[in-house]
Image (cartoon, helix red, strand yellow):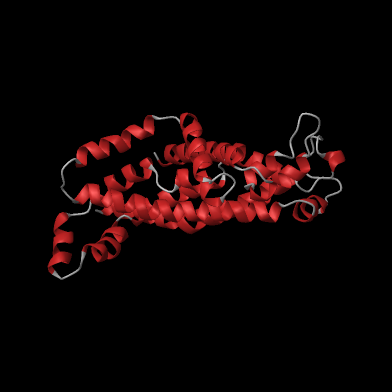
Amino acid sequence: MKKRRYFKKSIVYILLTVGAIFMLFPFIWMVSTSFKPPSEVYGLKLLADHPTLDNYRKIMVDTLFNKWFFNSFIFAIITTLSVALFDTLVGYVIAKFSFVGKNIIFLFILSSLMIPTEMLIIPWYIMSTDLGWVDTYWGIMFPGVISAFGIFLMKQFMESIPDDLLDAARIDGLNEFKIFFQIAIPQVYPALSALCIFTFLGNWNAYLWPLIVIETEEMRTLPVGLAFFSGENQTYWEIVMAGATIAVVPLIIVFLIFQRHIIKGITLTGLK
């Protein structure tokens, strides 16, 4: 029996290792290509024969990459903070308060999830044009300051908080805002962490809407800026890979920061 279990575990670990290699290989190839000179980009060697940092110098010095990085960072951070606050607040109100039309409002919120983003592009652009939001930070951010998915996610987790716990806080004299920030949010922190990760990743990698609403080179975000190195006549893959390598660093940092909270939340949920 021990040998059989050991054999099964070995097979599982081998399959997981192979899967991890397949998933990591594109990332490793991207990083490797970022150090290759143009003459070696299309070669099949993983490591460059003559590695160089010239690609990083070109994209940092000869382009507006720093400005694009700043634009993406501001865009992703503000929308993430906005979603974390408003989605959690709306989810709390819908889950823990009774008022006329609550179910109808929640139904409308869920219904918006069925509308493809592509169908909203034209109304968003018309509104941005009428209000003067084209080629502005707010014009890029406003479609993502609150999300229906986040409201649904936080509402489901808020419902798991015992009403007696909130009532006890009210008896102790806490107002609703203190109950929300000091009692409710710590209980759903794992879900909030997951929501922050998904929101940051989605907005950091957003391409279609920023491409449409941005008009000047200075206002481009990273995905839009890097896309202009790819054209019909020539694509500077070494530059694209260098930019993509730098662009992925904030995503790794965000994931590492919030990862332990998600794992902790899963563990605590099992104990409960």
Is 154 situated left or right of 6 in this image? left
Q: Nearer the viewer, residue 266 or 184?
A: 184
Figure check: 192 above or below 130: below
Q: Position of residue 94 (x, y in %)?
A: 23, 47
**Residue displayed at 31% across by 35% down:** 110
Which quadrant, please, contains the N terminus? Answer: top left
**Residue displayed at 74% across by 45% down:** 32
Q: Nearer the viewer, residue 232 or 131?
A: 131
Q: Position of residue 260 (x, y in %)?
A: 44, 57
Say which quarter of the image contains residue 22.
Answer: top right
From this viewpoint, is residue 238 visible? yes
Is 11 situated left or right of 263 in this image? right
Total number of numbered labels?
0
Say which quarter of the image contains residue 207.
Answer: top right
**Residue displayed at 76% across by 45% down:** 239
Q: Position of residue 217 (x, y in %)?
A: 69, 47
From this viewpoint, is residue 11 visible? no
Is 151 situated left or right of 241 in this image? left
**Which residue is farthest bottom?**
173
**Residue displayed at 40% across by 30% down:** 115
Figure check: 118 above or below 153: above
Say which quarter of the image contains residue 163.
Answer: bottom left
**Which residue is farthest front?**
130
Q: Nearer the viewer, residue 154 or 73?
A: 73
Q: Position of residue 244 (x, y in %)?
A: 67, 46
